[in-house]
């Protein structure tokens, strides 16, 4: 029974989450305090570290959905998501503001701006997808192109100006809707999770991506088009990026091209890895990835609460990544199981000798 | 014509890609001379390209080695920043914030060099072990390495500062005059053409690495392992050890390259060498190193760096000096060369089938 629970893929992120929560409970019980306060607009809002995790972890959870699919189908990761968020966010602001960087009224409805941002992000996703699926370039190297150029393109879209939107309605997506004390990003993330759950349940997307990831040529022989499936996963990731970008720019009502969503690619990959998904492609577990995303956010918040400066965060996270991949490496697992066997056999021999 | 096409067919991949690179570089340089005036005709313009890119040449040599052996290392930029910061703090502890009121001239330059090499070696050992012996994807390992290095740099010291150590500054200011290449300036005064010490180091590295890859057993086994792991194993090459060595060499060169970068800028900062890993990969790819491994040439890499920086100079002197153009041009160039490579590979595969 215990063995079965431990072997379940979703056990890894949940165990990591419990460990982190326990760590916080011991070192700093205020971590669990949730207070009802008022934000600057005078609306009731909940606050506290747990709410921060739900709030800030939302983008990560949305990205983790797309990243899981890309990882499963192509056996590599997209490292351009941070840069793509800058592009999509910049597009949204450009559509909303036009050439005027301090508009009093929005030029277009927010929904239209989001759709255009979504199309742009999906186009860039499609570009990555073409490089990976048709030209057969390793995903990480193909997306390295956008990783370098992305923030430059984002700055270019807005002529390197920083538009600021004063309309409070735009702030709802990354903040609070008046009267609802729970942060909006959480609802958006929940909506995305429900959509992807329905898609996986009622279409063959999940099956096909796993088939392509496990064995490309045999999936082709079975009538699946691996080129299209790989391309599709990148486009889906593009859509996820656009949603995350909307939340990100809405939080600030502005954008900073070099800082927005910095290092988020690392967190997204980490979420997928923490969910116990093989980074080399193949089978995946979406729920585990999403929980993984919130675990990463918990780790970030915990580190912040222990006064780790934000620039130094990557160093700690890198150690976690390395530890994770080492533990999940087949070679390491084999070595450990061999070692355990030897230990058992050694004990038996000792007993026999006695 | 048929003779020419026969010759074209007989060319190995290495030579074909190398020829493309060298031709592209000379075309670009001649184009720059013709269209953008006499600035490019001065030898010093060329030497300045070398001066500014000495560190990149060294980093790219390491990158090519690891790519030929079938891996990749994106931690070199982060390592460069880490090396500059560690050496800066050692040479000038007071400004580095480590010790109050210490004579900035007490640190010895030789020890700082040793620190750079040791950081490189340590990185190489860890990353090489993880990649070669635990069989973890090199991209994941070095991605974590990159974030670790950047995070570690901020932990060592957050604020950028210039080093005031006299011995170091003297070494930094050393100019090596290239005889016969000087020009007469506007005042009618003869100005010598010069290169920095870093350039000499870079050229030595290029020559050593060229000889190592071409004429030593280790160098040949890099090609064998990168080309086809299974066949290399059957030939009796120790695949794991070869991969391990490729990472050691890459990281060692990154340590040396970091020091050369330090010599060029004379300061330590977290933001140093931002995106250098990208430039190094781009240079290697433009220089004809295949991402799939097994094909590549150090001379090509050298010309790759020169092409990359020449195009940056052209972009800058054409008046497009906004920061984003650099990123976009590099990404575009990389994209083109990647597609060319993938086409070459596809043609080779179809030729084998016939």
Image: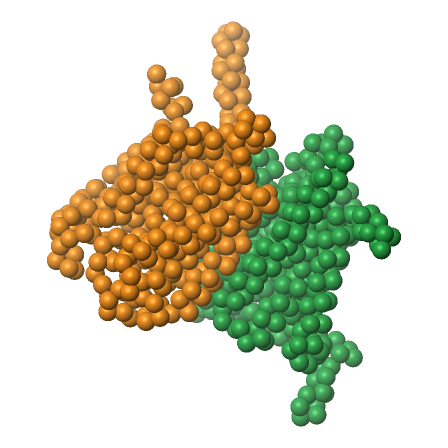
Q: Return the residue nearer the eye: A274 or B96.
A: A274
Q: Quadrant of the N terminus of chain A?
A: top left
- Residue located at (52% from left, 15% from top): A346
Report which quarter residue B70 is drawn in. top right
Image spot of residue A86 (x, y percent) = 40, 57
Residue A4 drawn above or below residue B231: above
Query: Relative to A301, is B94 on the left or the right?
Result: right
Image spot of residue A169 (x, y percent) = 21, 58
Q: Which chain is orange?
A: A
Q: Residue furthest bottom?
A: B187
Q: Which color scheme does this rendered protein use?
A: by chain
Q: Colour of chain B?
A: green
- Residue located at (74% from left, 35% from top): B353
- Residue located at (65% from left, 40% from top): B243
Residue B193 drawn above or below residue A204: below
Tell me if I can see residue B204 in this picture: no
Image spot of residue A293 (x, y percent) = 36, 41
Residue B328 drawn above or below residue A323: below
Image spot of residue B49 (x, y percent) = 65, 70
Query: Relative to A24, is A161 on the left or the right?
Result: right
**Number of numbered discs:** 0
Query: Relative to A324, is A194 on the left or the right?
Result: left
Tell me if I can see residue B3 in this picture: yes
Residue B17 drawn above or below residue B321: above
Report which quarter residue A218 is drawn in. top right
- Residue located at (62% from left, 56% from top): B336
Q: Return the residue nearer the eye: A320 or B331.
A: B331
């Amino acid at each position: 029974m215990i063995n079965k629970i431990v072997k379940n893929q979703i056990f890894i992120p949940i165990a990591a989450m419990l460990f982190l929560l326990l760590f916080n409970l011991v070192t700093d019980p205020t971590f669990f305090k949730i207070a009802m306060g008022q934000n600057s607009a005078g609306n009731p809002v909940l606050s506290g570290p747990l709410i921060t995790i739900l709030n800030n972890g939302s983008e990560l959870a949305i990205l983790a959905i797309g990243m899981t699919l890309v990882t499963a189908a192509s056996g590599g990761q997209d490292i351009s998501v941070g840069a793509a968020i800058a592009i999509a966010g910049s597009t949204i602001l450009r559509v909303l503001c036009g050439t005027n960087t301090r508009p009093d009224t929005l030029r277009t409805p927010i929904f239209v701006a989001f759709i255009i941002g979504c199309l742009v992000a999906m186009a860039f996703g499609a570009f990555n997808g073409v490089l990976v699926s048709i030209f057969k370039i390793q995903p990480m190297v193909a997306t390295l192109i956008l990783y370098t150029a992305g923030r430059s393109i984002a700055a270019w879209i807005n002529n390197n100006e920083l538009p600021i939107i004063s309309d409070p309605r735009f702030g709802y997506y990354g903040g609070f809707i008046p009267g609802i004390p729970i942060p909006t990003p959480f609802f958006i993330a929940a909506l995305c999770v429900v959509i992807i759950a329905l898609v996986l349940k009622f279409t063959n997307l999940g099956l096909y991506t796993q088939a392509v990831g496990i064995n490309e040529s045999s999936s082709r022989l079975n009538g699946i088009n691996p080129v299209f499936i790989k391309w599709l996963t990148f486009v889906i990731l593009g859509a996820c990026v656009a949603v995350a970008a909307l939340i990100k720019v809405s939080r600030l009502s502005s954008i900073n091209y070099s800082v927005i969503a910095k290092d988020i690619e690392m967190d997204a990959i980490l979420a997928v890895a923490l969910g116990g998904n093989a980074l080399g492609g193949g089978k995946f577990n979406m729920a585990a990835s999403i929980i993984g995303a919130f675990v990463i956010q918990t780790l970030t918040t915990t580190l912040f609460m222990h006064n780790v400066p934000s620039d130094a965060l990557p160093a700690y996270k890198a150690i976690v990544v390395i530890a994770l991949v080492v533990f999940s490496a087949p070679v390491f697992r084999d070595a450990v199981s061999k070692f355990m066997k030897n230990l058992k056999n050694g004990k038996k021999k000792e007993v026999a000798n006695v | 014509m048929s003779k020419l096409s026969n010759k074209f067919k007989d060319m190995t991949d290495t030579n074909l890609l190398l020829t493309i690179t060298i031709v592209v570089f000379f075309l670009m340089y001649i184009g720059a001379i013709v269209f953008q005036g006499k600035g490019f005709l001065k030898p010093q313009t060329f030497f300045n390209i070398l001066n500014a890119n000495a560190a990149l040449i060294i980093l790219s040599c390491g990158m090519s080695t690891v790519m030929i052996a079938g891996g990749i290392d994106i931690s070199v930029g982060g390592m460069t920043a880490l090396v500059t910061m560690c050496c800066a703090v050692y040479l000038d502890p007071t400004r580095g914030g480590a010790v109050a009121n210490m004579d900035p001239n007490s640190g010895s330059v030789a020890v700082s060099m040793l620190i750079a090499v040791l950081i490189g070696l340590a990185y190489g050992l860890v990353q090489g072990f993880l990649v070669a012996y635990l069989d973890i994807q090199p991209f994941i390992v070095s991605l974590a390495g990159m974030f670790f290095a950047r995070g570690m740099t901020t932990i060592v010291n957050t604020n950028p500062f210039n080093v005031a150590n006299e011995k170091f500054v003297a070494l930094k200011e050393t100019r090596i005059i290239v005889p016969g290449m000087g020009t007469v300036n506007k005042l009618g005064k003869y100005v010598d053409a010069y290169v920095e010490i870093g350039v000499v180091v870079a050229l030595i590295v290029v020559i050593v690495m060229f000889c190592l890859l071409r004429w030593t057993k280790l160098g040949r086994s890099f090609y064998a392992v990168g080309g086809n792991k299974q066949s290399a194993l059957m030939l009796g090459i120790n695949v794991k050890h070869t991969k391990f060595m490729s990472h050691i060499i890459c990281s060692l060169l990154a340590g040396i390259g970091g020091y050369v970068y330090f010599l060029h800028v004379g300061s330590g900062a977290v933001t140093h060498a931002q995106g250098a890993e990208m430039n190094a990969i781009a240079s290697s790819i433009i220089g004809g190193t295949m991402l799939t491994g097994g094909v590549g040439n150090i001379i090509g890499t050298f010309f790759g760096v020169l092409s990359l920086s020449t195009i940056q100079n052209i972009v800058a002197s054409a008046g497009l000096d906004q920061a984003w153009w650099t990123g976009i041009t590099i990404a575009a160039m990389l994209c083109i060369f990647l597609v060319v490579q993938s086409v070459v590979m596809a043609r080779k595969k179809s030729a084998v089938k016939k």
